[in-house]
Each structure stands twice: as C-alpha cells, then as structure tokens.
Image: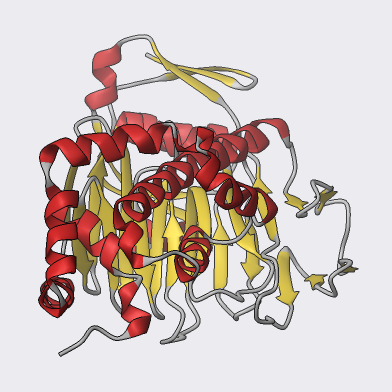
Amino acid sequence: MRVKQENMTQIPEIILKKISQKVTEEELQLLEEWLSQSEQNRVLYQKVMHRNNLAFIEKECQNIDNEIAWGKVLRKIKMQKRMPVKSLFMKVLRYAALLMLPLLVASYLLFLHSSQKDSSDTFAQMEKQILELKESSLITDDGEVVYLESKSNETLVEIDGTQIQQKDSTLLYHKEAKDNEDVKYNSLVTPRGKVYNLVLADGTKVWLNASSAIKYPVSFSSDIRKVYLTGEAYFEVARDTLKPFIVSTSEMDIEVLGTIFNVMAYPDDKVMETTLVSGQVKVKAYKNNMILTPGMQAHIDKENKIVNQTKTDTDMFTSWRFGRYIFEYENLEGVMGKLSRWYDVQVSFADTEKKNLHFSGSLFKYKEIDETLHIIELATNVRFDRSENFIIVR
C-alpha cells in the first residue's frame, strides 16, 4: 500500500514525533507504509535517525538562516509572517523534494523554534498591554488602540471590510473568511477591575475576566481556529468539525471542536486551570496530553511542571461571569490574588504563613472592597489594613 501524495508531507513531522516519543499508532502505520515503499526511503530514514546525523541536523537548524539554500524560505516567512506555522510549513513542503528529508526535518525544527519564540513574544506583548491600558481596549491589526469604555454602541469598519460592532460591553465580529486571505489579528484587553465580552467571526462567545488579554484572527480562513490568552476567559465555542478551536496560553494548549469551558492562565499565578463545563477538550502541557470530560479540571503546576486532572464543581470556577467568586477551602494567597485583580489593589502579607490559611465562602464582586474584606476577616484569623490601593494582611 502506497502512501498518498497528500500524506507525504507528514513524514518529517511523524519522524520528529517518533524521536520525541509522541507518535500515535496511526502515524506509525503511515511511517511504516512509507518505509515499505522503497529501499531508498529506508536508507534515508536510517540516516536521519542516526545519532550523529540528528545532532548535525539540530546544529544546522540553529544556523539555518545563514544558509543560502534556505534564503527563499526565510523570505517567505517574512512576507507571510501572519500565516499560521502549519499552513506555511505545508506550503514550503509542496515545493521541496522528499529526498531532502534531513533538511525538511531541520526546517520543521526551525519553524517550531520560531513558533515558540513568536508565542513568547505574543504573550509578553499582551502582558505589557494589560499593565499599560487602564480601560478595556481593542487593539487592531495595525496597532491602533480603541478605548471601548468611552464609546457606546458603535460600529467600526476596518479597511478589509471587517465589521466590529460594540454593544453593551460586547464586541461582535462580522467577517466572511476567504481562502488564501492574510490572517489579521485583533486583541481585546481588560485592565484590573473590568470585564468584557467578545463574539468571534465564527460565532464563538468569549467572556474575558479582569486583567486579561486575548489575541484572535478577525476571520478564520485557515484549517484551525487559534486564539492566544493570558489571564482568564470563559468560552462557548461554535462547533466546526473541519476547524478545531485552540486556546493557546504560555504553558498549555486547549483543543476543542465545540464546547464550553473556562481557562485561568494568569502569568503571576503559580497554577493554570482548565475547567470543562460541557463537551470534550484536549489539554496539552509539558509534553502531557489529557482528555477532559464535563466536570473535570486540568490543573497545571507551573513551578514543578506537574499536570493532573480532578473532578470539580464547575460553578466555583465560572461564577465570576455572574458577579460572584466562590471559594472552597482555598488558601488566602489565592483568594487575595483574585481580589487584587478585581479591585485593582496591591496586597502584601505581614506574615507569610497567613498565605496558607484557608477560606470558604461566596464573595460578590460588585460589593465595596471594605465589605468584602470584612467578610474574610470574620471567617479567618486575619485583619486587613487598607490605605487607598494598598492592603496589608496581618
């Protein structure tokens, strides 16, 4: 049985997955079929898999931008820098000979490295925007900042025809996707103490919590729907079996077809969490893959790089959309972290041991801060000294 021509371009990626021991049974079968097609394929595979050759490929990959042979590839990357890495990689492969498999593997490593660097730059930029912007803001593809709270029920029409309607603290996108269209990204940013909603061009609904940012295509013209998140958001994903929806954070990716879930991924927190309300999601973090079913939560320990899943009450992690924070035996450090983002205050502990005290209860986000602090004082062995935007826990 011969490997179909359209599947030939998957071989370098499958080889890389085999090297990193992340290959699936289906991919192994495809690789075996390719190896059985010719002695030339088997010899080439053995050369690529040889330890010395792998070391050489990785070394060449690090310096590949200095190779004249790859000048055209690098220019293509520069010209189409907004194109998803996978789409660009596939275009390059269409014009490359399969006999150049070692170079293709190296080029894939280059794209992977570039993708990781671009992602790091993306999250760093988003975190900077959260700190700099003091009201909910839309950032367009060309860098224009639109302050949303100073406008009401307006419609913005971009040059490419994208219609962005603002209505009652919600942005709604209207843009018909076209094949081979350059991907344009917008960002929605909320500062401390603010929330905002978003309806993407595919109908996916997003609730963005305080001190958060999401970067997203204005239309989904590629074979995946990928957005970038720092902070916290609740998603109701529009189902599309041909285009998986991916939420990418600094430490994990969540892949779905159509479902409802909450993601908490604040950069200053020690943990990240994905809580599934309905449907099914795949969570990828630190080379771990796990499938969540409704009522399950993926818990990511960023310090120790540990991933696990537990059964949970989803209301505890989604009630913020309705103006409440529900806590069940949560340590005081975590409680005060959430309140600091909502009330825009700085919190410090006079006694660090108090961080490990636990609190259970329901707090209403829209109450005055002094009333909220008083409730916590009654339930725990602490008192708060507040001076404007600074709180000391004693």
Colour mapping used in the image: secondary structure
Q: Position of residue 113 (x, y in %)?
A: 41, 42
Residue at image coords 63%, 37%: 130
Q: Looking at this view, name the residue that lies furthest to the bottom.
A: 1
Question: From this viewpoint, is residue 248 visible?
Answer: yes
State whether residue 392 is above or below residue 142: above
Residue 185 shown left or right of residue 93 in the figure: right
Foreground residue among 338 and 14: 14
Residue at image coords 65%, 48%: 78
Foreground residue among 186 and 189: 186
Residue 38 shown left or right of residue 157 in the figure: left
Foreground residue among 149 and 142: 142
Question: From this viewpoint, is residue 22 visible?
Answer: no
State whether residue 165 is above or below residue 109: below
State whether residue 35 is above or below residue 380: below
Q: Position of residue 33 (x, y in %)?
A: 14, 79
Residue 320 shown left or right of residue 277 in the figure: right
Q: Looking at this view, name the residue that lies furthest to the front.
A: 40
Residue at image coords 12%, 39%: 51
Q: Position of residue 375 (x, y in %)?
A: 41, 37
Q: Position of residue 158 (x, y in %)?
A: 86, 66
